[in-house]
Structure formats: structure tokens, C-alpha cells
Image (cartoon, helix red, strand yellow):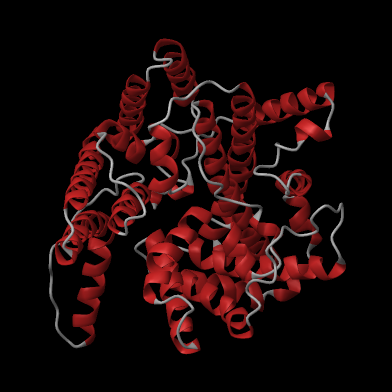
């Protein structure tokens, strides 16, 4: 079920009431109830794929149990390989089988050999990329002896399938989320109300920003040849805000929902479009995935400890793998390569750690230099997003070529006036997030910056806007990954 659906609007209060009023102070029953609710939540898409979650859960739970008993290095490594091959094997089969098959056929055709292997009509299980990485974090950390293996299969199963973040993250580390299933949880009013604020803002970003942008983005990208350069440029910008509103909106709803049940998930987005360089952008965009690749791929490869050539090689591997993680299409790989190229000058000049703090921290306005730095970073990111959104490589090239060669039409102000409604909504988003950028989410600061009447007026206004724009019920973009 979708977070922005009537089904979830019914599901969440029912689960909340049962969790706190029926199973209160009963930790094992609470965990068992969360597990059942999570399986029901996932089964609402396709109950058949529950077997994959159960299989991954049992494999990694068992591997953890055996790792606790085993001290021989080669046997421990063998157990780790069992987990890696099982989980990654399932992911590769469902997500990449046809991609590899199609490219295998093309290679043979290039050398004049025609083969006709049978492709499979596979349905990609929702959220498989997310829960696979989540459960792998457990096995790897147990193998590295950074985490004690659990003996509580209910708690572990609930950790793997926790419904708020099951489908599209954040990709939680076992070291953070799993221990929270061991502790008694008591209702915290402040935590719950702040969770509701975060859910509200997530819904605004999804329903009001992302879904409205999607309508124009689909129209422009699906009819590239019919539009002027200025419209294509606007389409690329709108997609930048669509994917941000869609994905960060999901993360906000997931994190806020978790807080209603006494759980704290990691921040997944930290106002990335206020970044002054690409390195800062990747510290603020999809943080759970970026740090996962850093800790479980980049550092094991050697990180930045070797020569400059080796470091550059590791960076390209990470960005290419990250791109490929997003989907079985060359456009995602090119998107990853582009971001690696963007990152390269900072790596060579060692300026990739220059901007750690949020821009203009403690100030109302940014400087002219910061404004240009943010603008350039956003433009580079938006160009890369064209490959992310395009149907294929040729489509992306045609889109960018038309956008550049029809440059004279950038002066066509009428085009932007036609999209004034969605542009106004985006400006509203930017303003609100600017004032809330020092916090975990944009509405968190309202508690201290607005008095009670103004605060609640603001909340009700957002609710009314969400209701006004609701009804489309668009799926979240990252469900396909």
C-alpha cells in the first residue's frame, strides 16, 4: 500500500492503537505485532514475494548464529559468502537477468553470431534492493565482529521487514535499528508529535511537489522533439524537484512513522539542493545508500588510503555500482559515471571536505559566492538527472541536444508563465526548507520559531493544500529500484 493512499491512512492508526494500547509493555508481543503488520503491509503489493523476505531473513539469521560459534577464519568467510551469494544472487536474478541477457545477445550479434536465448517475464519485487542491503549489513557487521549476533528471530525478522522503511528505505544498519527491537519502548509525546510533523512535510513533498511536477515532466520527456529548449530545460529542473520531493518525501514519512512507534531511523536527506559542491551533495542525498557503499564497498576496496590512481578507481567503482543499483539500464550507469567525473576535480584538489556544515549556518541569507556555488552544483546535478529520467541513452542525448541547440528559445518567458503554478509550489518548498535547514526536517524548527496559533494555522494550511492536490495516488519513483 502507498503512504499517500486511503489504505495507509486506515492501516497506520489501527496499527498504532493496537501497538500502544493492546501490546503496551509487552516487548515480544510488540515485536511480533510489528512483524505481522510489516508482512501484511508488504503483502498488499504481492503476497508471493513475502517468501523472498522470509528466505533472506532465515539465511542471515542462520549465518549469524553459526558465525557466533565459529572461530576459524576460512569457515567464517565461507559463511559470509553464503549470505552474500544468496542475497545478491536473488537481487541479480530478479533485477538484472534480462539486462545481462540482452547485452549478451548484442555482444554476439556484434561478432556476427545470432543467438536466441529465452528471456523471462520477471516482476521486480518491491523494495528488494533496500531490504537486501539492510539484511546484508547485519551479516557483514557480525562477520567483522562489530555486532553481536542475535538469538531473537522475531526481533531480527521485524528488523528486516520493518514496514515504514521496508519498501524504499532508509537502508538501516543493523547496528542502529536492530538493538532498538531489544529495548522496552514507551510512548513519547514529543517524539510522536515531531514524527507527525515529519509525516506531514513528507506528504507535502510527495503529493504537492513531486506529483505535480510528474505531470509536466512526463509530458515533456515523453514528447521531447515537440518542445523548445527552454521547455526542455524547465522539464529537467522539474524532474530534479520531482525526484527530490518523491524520494525525500518517502523518507520523511518513513522516519516520522517510525517515531510514532518509538523507533529512530537515520536521516536520509539533509537538504541536498543547498549543497555548494558535488561532494557535499552526496553527503546530503540518499545518505543511507551513500554511507552503505562507503562502509561496505569503498573502504574495503582501499578507500583513499592508496595512490591517487587507486583512489580515483575506487571512486568510479562506487559511483558506477551506485548507478547500477538504481536499475538495469545503461542510463543509470552513465548517470553514475557523470557524478564520478563531477567529483573528480575535488578529489584531486582535496577540496571534497570543504563544505561540511550546512550553508549560511545561523544566518538568514547566503553570500553571493554561496549562491553561485549552489546554482552551479544544482545545474550539474540536473544535467545528470536527465540520464536518470530518460528511457535510454539515445533519448537522453536527444533531450540534451535539443535543449542546447534550441538555446534561443530560453528567452521565451511565456513558457515559464504556463508553468507558474508548479513553479510557485517549488519556490514555497525552497523557502520553507531554507528556514528549516539546520534541523532534521523542515518543520522541526516551527516549534521554536512560530507561536502556537501561527504554527497550527500553518499545519492546517499544509493539510488543506495536500487534500487539494491529492487524488492522483502516484507510486513513489524508488519503488522500481
Image coords of residue 115 (percent x, y): 12, 75
Quarter occupied by residue 293: bottom left
Q: Is residue 201 above or below residue 437?
A: above
Say whether residue 6 is left or right of residue 350.
left
What percent of the width, then of the height, locates residue 137? 35, 53
Q: Nearer the viewer, residue 455 or 83?
A: 83
> Is residue 392 visible in the rendered structure shown here?
no
Task: Looking at the picture, tell me which residue is in the foreground, 441 or 139.
Answer: 139
Residue 208 visible in image:
yes
Q: Position of residue 286 (x, y in %)?
A: 52, 55
Relative vertical location of residue 384 with respect to residue 422 in this rendering, above or below: below
Residue at the (76%, 48%) spot, across then down:
420
The quarter of the picture where the N terminus appears is top left
Q: Is residue 458 above or below residue 123?
A: above
Q: Quadrant of residue 54?
A: top left
Above or below, comparing residue 332 to residue 136 in the picture = below
Residue 270 in the image: state x and y as whole percent. Answer: 63, 52
Question: Hey, which quadrant is residue 371 in on the image?
Answer: bottom right
Please tell me which residue is depicted at 35% across the width and 26% down the height of the picture: 31
Amino acid at each position: 500500500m502507498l503512504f499517500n493512499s486511503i489504505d495507509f491512512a486506515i492501516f497506520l492508526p489501527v496499527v498504532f492503537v493496537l501497538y500502544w494500547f493492546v501490546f503496551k509493555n509487552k516487548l515480544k508481543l510488540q515485536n511480533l505485532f510489528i512483524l505481522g503488520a510489516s508482512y501484511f503491509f508488504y503483502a498488499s503489493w504481492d503476497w508471493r514475494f513475502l517468501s523472498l523476505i522470509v528466505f533472506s531473513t532465515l539465511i542471515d539469521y542462520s549465518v549469524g548464529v553459526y558465525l557466533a560459534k565459529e572461530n576459524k577464519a576460512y569457515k567464517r568467510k565461507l559463511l559470509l559468502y553464503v549470505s552474500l551469494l544468496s542475497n545478491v544472487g536473488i537481487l541479480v536474478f530478479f533485477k538484472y537477468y534480462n539486462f545481462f541477457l540482452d547485452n549478451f545477445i548484442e555482444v554476439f550479434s556484434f561478432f556476427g553470431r545470432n543467438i536466441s536465448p529465452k528471456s523471462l517475464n520477471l516482476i521486480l519485487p518491491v523494495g528488494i534492493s533496500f531490504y537486501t542491503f539492510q539484511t546484508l549489513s547485519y551479516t557483514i557487521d557480525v562477520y567483522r565482529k562489530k555486532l553481536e549476533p542475535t538469538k531473537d528471530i522475531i526481533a531480527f525478522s521485524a528488523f528486516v521487514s520493518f514496514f515504514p522503511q521496508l519498501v524504499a528505505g532508509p537502508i538501516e544498519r543493523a547496528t542502529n535499528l536492530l538493538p532498538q527491537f531489544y529495548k522496552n519502548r514507551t510512548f513519547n509525546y514529543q517524539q510522536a508529535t515531531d514524527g507527525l510533523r515529519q509525516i506531514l512535510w513528507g506528504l507535502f513533498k510527495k503529493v504537492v511537489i513531486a506529483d505535480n511536477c510528474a505531470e509536466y515532466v512526463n509530458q515533456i520527456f515523453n514528447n521531447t522533439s515537440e518542445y523548445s529548449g527552454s521547455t526542455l530545460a524547465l522539464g529537467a529542473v522539474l524532474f530534479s524537484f520531482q525526484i527530490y520531493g518523491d524520494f525525500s518525501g518517502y523518507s520523511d514519512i518513513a522516519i516520522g512513522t517510525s517515531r510514532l512507534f518509538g523507533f529512530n531511523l537515520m536521516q536520509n536527506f539533509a537538504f541536498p539542493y543547498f549543497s555548494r559542491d558535488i561532494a557535499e551533495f552526496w553527503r546530503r542525498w540518499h545518505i543511507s545508500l551513500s554511507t552503505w557503499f562507503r562502509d561496505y564497498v569503498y573502504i574495503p576496496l582501499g578507500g583513499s588510503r592508496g595512490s591517487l590512481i587507486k583512489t580515483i578507481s575506487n571512486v568510479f567503482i562506487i559511483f558506477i555500482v551506485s548507478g547500477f543499483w538504481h536499475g538495469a539500464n545503461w542510463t543509470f550507469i552513465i548517470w553514475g559515471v557523470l557524478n564520478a567525473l563531477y567529483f573528480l576535480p575535488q578529489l584531486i584538489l582535496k577540496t571534497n571536505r570543504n563544505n561540511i556544515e550546512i550553508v549560511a549556518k545561523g544566518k538568514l541569507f547566503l553570500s553571493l559566492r554561496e549562491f553561485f556555488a549552489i546554482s552551479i552544483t544544482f545545474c550539474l546535478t540536473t544535467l545528470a538527472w536527465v540520464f536518470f529520467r530518460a528511457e535510454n541513452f539515445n533519448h537522453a542525448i536527444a533531450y540534451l541536444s535539443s535543449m542546447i541547440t534550441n538555446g534561443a528559445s530560453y528567452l521565451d518567458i511565456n513558457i515559464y508563465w504556463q508553468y507558474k503554478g508548479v513553479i510557485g509550489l517549488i519556490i514555497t518548498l525552497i523557502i520553507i526548507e531554507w528556514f528549516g535547514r539546520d534541523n532534521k526536517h523542515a518543520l522541526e524548527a516551527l516549534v521554536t520559531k512560530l507561536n502556537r496559533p501561527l504554527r497550527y494555522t500553518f499545519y492546517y494550511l499544509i493539510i488543506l493544500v495536500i487534500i487539494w492536490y491529492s487524488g492522483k495516488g502516484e507510486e513513489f519513483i524508488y519503488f522500481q529500484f
